[in-house]
Amino acid sequence: MGRTLAQKIWDSHVVSRAQGEPDLLYIDLHLVHEVTSPQAFDGLRLAGRQVRRPDLTVATEDHNVPTTGVTGPGLPLRGPGSPVTDPVSRVQVEALRKNCAEFGIRLYPMGDAGQGIVHVIGPQQGLTLPGMTIVCGDSHTSTHGAFGALAFGIGTSEVEHVLATQTLPQAQPANMAVNVTGRLPYGVTAKDLILAIIARLGTGGGAGHVIEYRGAAVQHLSMDGRMTVCNMSIEAGARAGLVAPDETTFAYLAGRPHAPRGAAWEEALGYWRSLPTDPGAVFDREVTVDASALTPFVTWGTNPAQAAPLGSSVPDPTSLADEGARASAQRALAYMDLAPGTRLTDITVDTVFVGSCTNGRLEDLRAAAEVLRGRKVAKGVQMLVVPGSMEVKAAAEREGLADVFTAAGAQWRSAGCSMCLGMNPDKLAPGQRSASTSNRNFEGRQGKGGRTHLVSPQVAAATAVTGRLTAAADL
Amino acid sequence: MQPFTTHTGRAVSLRRSNVDTDQIIPAEYLKRVTRTGFADGLFAAWRADPEFVLNQPAAVGATILVAGPDFGIGSSREHAVWALLDYGFRAVISARFGDIFRNNSVQAGLLPVRLPADVVTALQDLAEDGRAAEVTVDLAGREVWAAAGPDGPPLLTAGFEIDEYTRWRLMEGLDDISLTLRHSGKIAGYERGRPGWLPVAG
C-alpha cells in the first residue's frame, strides 16, 4: 500500500519504535522564541543537562518586541535607549539572550537583519526544507508544512525534551486530505481559502490529524500562499498541515542561505521528489472544497470557524440546529456586539492590522499595497503594517511598498508578532474593533475587550480605505 | 510531576464549548519566566464577571473541571495547564480536547479525561444542581463516577479510554526526558545516518 507524504516523513524520522510505546521521532530543526522557552531552559539547568544539538536550534525575539523605536541592532534592553518599555517583557527577552549564550544557540535579536517572526525567518533562510521534522513552542509551527515538512507546535515541557534529546515521543497522527479543486477566482486569496476550510471543518474537525492540502488550487498557490494555508491548520484543530513539494517549492529554495548547493542540491532534490503521497495511499478522511466557488471570507465570531463570505450577513444563532453551536454563536455575537442579520460589509472598524506569521510576508504586503496605492486610509481608522521579518521589511522598502503605505496614512513598523496576540505594545483597547490579517479572533486576543475580524490582506487594505469590511473589488 | 492514580474531589461545570487557551490564560500572563504563580491568570477575563462559575461559592475548592467540547484549542502555551494546576485542578473532563493542550496536560500531570458529549452533559447537570457532591476520576480503573457523598450510591459511572503508555507514565509520575535518554545510543546512531545536506544553524 502506498504512503502519504506525512507517513513518509514520519517513517524516516523514527529513532525507536516499540510495542505499546509512542514512536520516538528525530527533530531536524527546533525553533525557539522568548515566551515558551524560559521554563524549559530552567528545567535543563535543574537536571544538569545540555542542549544536545545547539546547531539544530535557532532562536528569535518576536512575541514581546515592540515594532516602533527599533532603529537597528545592538539596542540596549535597559535604560533610556531601550525600545522595550515593559519591564516584564524585558525580563523575558533577557532570559532568552542569557539562555542562548549559555547553551550556544544562534539567536536573532531585536533589530538584527535576520530577526523576525519565528515562522517567517526559517523559510526565508532556507532552514525549512521538504521532508524535515520541525517543532517550536508555538502552535503556528504548522506554517512550515508548506514546504512538505512535518512541522507542529509543542508545549514547554516538550521544548525541554527536544533541547535535551533532539527527539520527541509522539503518537502517530491520522491523515486527512483536503482536496481543493478548481482555481481561486481573481481577488480570492489563500487566506480566504483557509478561512473557508476552517469554517467547513470546525475548530476541532482536524483533531488527531495532519492535513495534506491537495488539488489544482493548492498547486497554483505561491509559497507565501501555501504558508498562509498551512499556518492556520491548527485553527481547524490539526497538528500539522502539509503541501507536497514541487517545482514552486524548489524554485523558492534555490540559493537560500541554508539550502543545499551543487551536488548536495541535486541529492536533496532527488529525495524531495520521492516525498509526495503515493497514488495508492489511503487517507483516513477526505474533504473536497471547490475553490472556484469561493469569494472573500471573513470571521464574524470569536473563533476562526465562525466565518462567512464577506457578501453575506451575520448569522442568526437561533437558526443553528446544534445546541452547542447556538450557545457559542450567541456568546460570540454578544462579545462582538453584533446583531444577527447585519450585512458583514456594514460592520465598521477603527483598526486595521496587516502582518503576523499568517500574512506578514512580502506577497501579503504587495497585495495590500496594490489596493492602497493612490488611496487614503479612512479618517478615524488606524492601520498598522508590520512586516514578518526585518528581511521582508528591507525588501518592501526596496520595492517602494513602504512608501505606498505611508503615503496612504498607514503606520510602517519593524518586524514582530505585533497586534496578533497582545503581548507587546500593539494592542486593541477595550471595545475597539479590527480587521486583522492574523490567525485568531478569540476574545481578547488582540487586547482585552478588543474585537477581531480575520481577513485577507486585500480585504484589510480595502477596509482601511472605507472604514468598514470591504472587498477590494468593491472599491 | 505528581503521580496520578485516583482522585476524588468537587467538580465544577463550565458549560462553554471551544474554550481556547487564550481564555484559560490571557497572553499578558505569559511573560513570566517561572512554572508557577499562574493561578491568578486562570480565566482572568471571565473571572472579572461575578456571575462566572468559578466565582460561585459552590466552586470553592473544586478540583475537577467539566467543560464543553473542544477544550484547550488554540495556542500551544503550557501556561494554560500550569494555571489550571496552580488553581487546584487535577483533572479536566470534556468531549474533545485540543491536541497540544492534551499533550501538555499529560506532561505536567493534569489528567485530560475524554467522555462522550452526553455523559459530560449529564455530569455537568449533576455538578450544577449540587447532587454530585463528589466526583472520582480513577485512572487505574479508567473510570469516572459521581456520588452524592462518600457513602452515597453512585449517580453516574462512565469508563474512559486512555492509551496504556500515557496511563503508566501518569501513574508513575515519570517525565519523558529520562525515559527517552534510555535511547541515547539509538539517537546517536540515527544522527550518524542523517544526510549531510540537512541545514545547521549558523
Image (cartoon, rainbow, N blue to C red):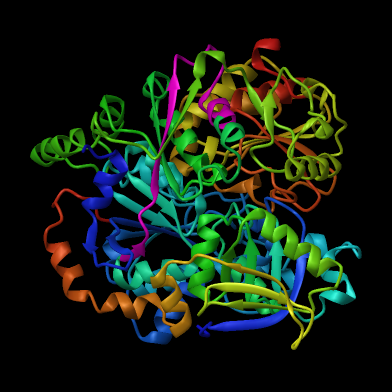
Q: Is residue B49 left or right of residue B194?
A: right
Query: x, y (%) of residue A64?
Result: 59, 58
Tell me the quarter of the picture where residue A120 sits. Answer: top left
Residue drawn at (62%, 82%), measured in percent from left and top? B7
Q: How many discs appear?
A: 0
Q: Is residue A122 left or right of residue B93?
A: left
Query: x, y (%) of residue B168?
Result: 42, 78
Q: Is residue A121 visible?
A: yes
Q: Is residue A240 visible?
A: no
Q: Is residue A67 left or right of residue B140?
A: right
Task: Pick the quarter of the image with the C terminus of chain B.
Answer: bottom left
Residue drawn at (75%, 54%), measured in percent from left and top? B16
Query: x, y (%) of residue A195?
Result: 59, 31
* Residue A185 position (above or below residue B129): above
Query: x, y (%) of residue B182?
Result: 25, 79
Q: Which of A35 and A178 lies nearest the eye of the viewer?
A: A178
Which residue is outermost to the right? B50
Q: Is residue B182 left or right of residue A138?
A: left
In the image, the segment drawn in magenta is A167-196
Q: Which of A13 and A270 lies nearest the eye of the viewer?
A: A13
